[in-house]
Image (cartoon, rainbow, N blue to C red):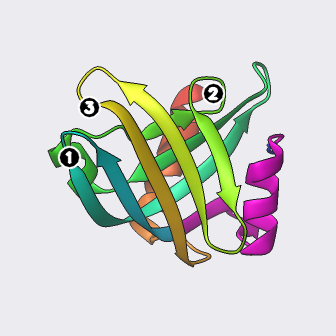
Amino acid sequence: MKITLQPLIDFVNDFDLNSPNKGICFNATIHFSSQFLTLTLNSDVQIININAKNINVIYLFSNEIAKSGIPDMFEDDHEKITYLFKNCLIIKGHSLSFGNFVVTIHPENSSCSEETLTKIHSRRLNFN
């Protein structure tokens, strides 16, 4: 699944995040900010393209995200995604719970945990 949004392509290429065997899955520091909540946490991140709809999707995998209620999925047709060169991916969006929000994704390394890879594999099997 090849991503198609230029800011995502630049981000993945600049940080060398694409693995031939595992796709685009990496560990990052996530900063979430809205008028109601500011949160910093560590999370695995997966970036995929849904070919049938040509939508690029960013998933966050962290138990802290579920506890806080912040969004854990972002689509390029709903959120504005930009890239700050050699720094971070920036996602601007809106949710019912938090209103307008900004998420920044700062890569820490280019691989996900085995637990996350198992979740991704399980999700893929359920969609087939």
Q: Label 1 near label 2: C-beta < 8 Å?
A: no
What residue appears at the point 30 percent right and 65 percent down from the top-left corner? 41
The answer to whether residue 87 is left or right of residue 102 is right
What residue appears at the point 40 percent right and 62 percent down from the top-left corner? 30
Callout 2 environment at 10 Å: few (<14), some (14 to 19), or many (20+)? few
What residue appears at the point 50 percent right and 45 percent down from the top-left corner? 59
Q: Label 1 near label 3: C-beta < 8 Å?
A: yes
The answer for how far apart the CA atoms under marks 2 and 1 are is 37 Å
- Which residue corresponds to mark 3? 98
Which sits in the foreground, 47 or 70?
70
Q: In the rendered structure, does residue 51 fall within the stretch colored magenta?
A: no
Callout 3 environment at 10 Å: few (<14), some (14 to 19), or many (20+)? some
Q: In the rendered structure, does residue 15 fall within the stretch colored magenta?
A: yes
Q: Residue 100, position in %: x, y? A: 37, 31
- Which residue corresponds to mark 2? 128
Q: Which residues are magenta?
A: 4-26
On-image quarter of the N terminus: top right
- Which residue corresponds to mark 1? 37
Q: How many marks?
A: 3
Q: Quadrant of residue 52?
A: top right
Q: Residue 68, position in %: x, y? A: 18, 46
Q: Label 3 near label 2: C-beta < 8 Å?
A: no
